[in-house]
Image (cartoon, rainbow, N blue to C red):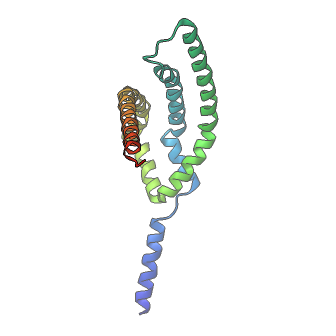
Amino acid sequence: MKSLLLAFALALFSVAGWAQAPSDPSLERLLAVTQAERMNDSVIAQVKASLKPMMAKALDGQTLDAEQRAQADELINRLAARTEIILAEELAWDRMKAFNLQVYREAFTQREVDDLITFYESPTGRAFVDKMPAVMAKTMGLMQERMGPLMARLQAAAAETAREFTEQQRTRKGAAPM
C-alpha cells in the first residue's frame, strides 16, 4: 500500500512538474526570440498606414463638391491623427508586453515555452520570425481587398432585412382588427 501511495505521489509530482507555469524570465526570452516588440511595432505601422485609405473608402460612391471633399479630407486627417495617438497609447509595447506575458503565462507550460524558445532560436524559427512582418502586411492587404465586397454584401443583407422587417410590420398593421 505504501509503495502504491509513493508511486501515486511521484506521478503527481512529475505531472505537476510537467505542467509547471512558465517563469517570467523564460516568457521574456520567448518574446525576445520571437521579436514580439518588432512585430507589435509592425502591426501599429500597418494599421496606421491603412487608416486614411480605409476612411476615404467609406466615401466611395458619394458625390461631393470641392468644398465637401475638402471638409471630408480634413475630417479624415483629424480622425486619422487622433486614431494614431490612441493606437500609440493603447498598443505601446510596455502595455502589450504585459498583455503578452499574461496570455502566454496562462496558455503555455514551462516545457512548452522552453520548446518554443528552442524552435525560434533555430534557423527555421528565425526565418519564420523574419518573414512574419511581410506575411502580416500581405495578409492585411488581402483582407482590405476582401473587406470592400464583404461590407457591400453585409450592407445589402442589412438593407434587405430592414426592408423585410418593414414589410412585415406593414402587413401586421394591415391585418390587425379595427
| 54 relative to 67, above or below | below
- Residue under the image location 56 percent in, 15 percent down: 73
Q: Position of residue 64 (x, y in %)?
A: 50, 11
Nearest to the observer: residue 49 or residue 146: 146
Q: Position of residue 107 (x, y in %)?
A: 47, 56
Relative horizontal placement of residue 18, taking residue 70 as reference (left or right): left
Nearest to the observer: residue 44 or residue 104: 44
Outermost residue on the front side: it is 178
In which quarter of the view is residue 146 placed? top left
- Residue under the image location 58 percent in, 23 percent down: 80
Q: Position of residue 178 (x, y in %)?
A: 43, 47
Outermost residue on the bottom side: it is 1
Number of on-image labels: 0
In which quarter of the view is residue 61 placed? top left
Q: Quadrant of the N terminus?
A: bottom left
In which quarter of the view is residue 90 placed? top right
Relative horizontal placement of residue 77, taking residue 12 as reference (left or right): right
Q: Position of residue 125 (x, y in %)?
A: 39, 41
| 77 relative to 157, above or below | above
Outermost residue on the top side: it is 66
- Residue under the image location 59 percent in, 33 percent down: 87
- Residue under the image location 53 percent in, 42 percent down: 32
| 97 relative to 109, above or below | above
